[in-house]
Amino acid sequence: MIFIIICTIAFFCFNKEGFGYSNTSPLYTHFIYQFMHINIMHLSMNLFSFYTFYKPFKGKFCLMVLLYSYASSVIASFFSEGVKPTMGCSGLVFALIGIYIYLSITSKSITKEKRYNIILNYSLTILFPLAIMYFIPYINTMCHVYSLMLGFVSGFLINKINSKK
C-alpha cells in the first residue's frame, strides 16, 4: 500500500522531466524511475497490476518480495538503457510475476495439474503484453523481459532463504 501511495504522490507532485532513465541520464534515475509515470492511465494500469500481483504475498515475507522486485527492476534498467527515458513500475510488476511463478511452481503443496495451470495462465499473462509492447513505440520491452528473468532468480533466492528457516 505504501508503494501505491508513493507512486501517486510522485505523479501529482513532481515534474516528470529528468526522472526516467536512459543511456544519458544520471545514475539516480535508475533508482527512482519506478515511481514516475507518464499520465494517469499509465499510473492506473501499473498500480492496478502491482496490487493484483503483490496481493498474493501475505505474511512475513511481503517486504522481502517487494525489495527483491524493486532490486530486479533497478538491475534490469542498467541492461535496457535506450535513447528515450523509461518510467513506470511495470518492470517491478514483471519481477513480481516472475517471483510468483517461481514460488508457485516450486511449492511442495501444489499438484501437478495446478502447476501446469499456473504455467499456462501466467505464460499468456506475460506473452500477450510483451507482444503488444514490442510494437508500441517508446515502451522498453527489454526492461520488462529482464525484470521477469530477475524475478525468477529472486524467487529462487527467496525460496532458499525461506527453506533455511
Image: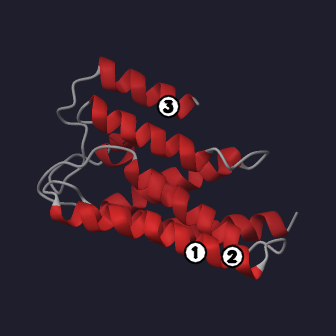
Q: Residue at x 53, y 60 (%)?
A: 97
Give the structural element (helix, strand or loop) at label 2. helix
Q: Residues within 10 Å of mark 3 (few under 14, many from 20)?
A: some
Q: Are marks 3 and 1 in contact (CB under 8 Å)?
A: no
Q: Residues within 10 Å of mark 1 (few under 14, many from 20)?
A: some
> Is 45 rendered above or below residue 144?
above
Where is residue 128, by image quadrant?
Answer: bottom left
Q: Give the percent coordinates (x, y) of residue 76.
A: 38, 62
Q: Which residue is mark 1?
A: 119
Can you tell which of label 2 and label 3 is closer to the viewer? 2
Residues at marks 3 and 1, CA–CA distance in whole angstroms: 28 Å
Q: What coloring was used for the rendering?
A: secondary structure
Seen as rendered, the residue at the extreme bottom is 112
Q: Which residue is mark 2?
A: 115
> Is 134 rendered above or below residue 42?
below
Q: Residue at x 79, y 45 (%)?
A: 59
Mark identifier at residue 4: 3
In the drawing, does residue 76 fall left or right of residue 138? right
Seen as rendered, the residue at the extreme top is 13
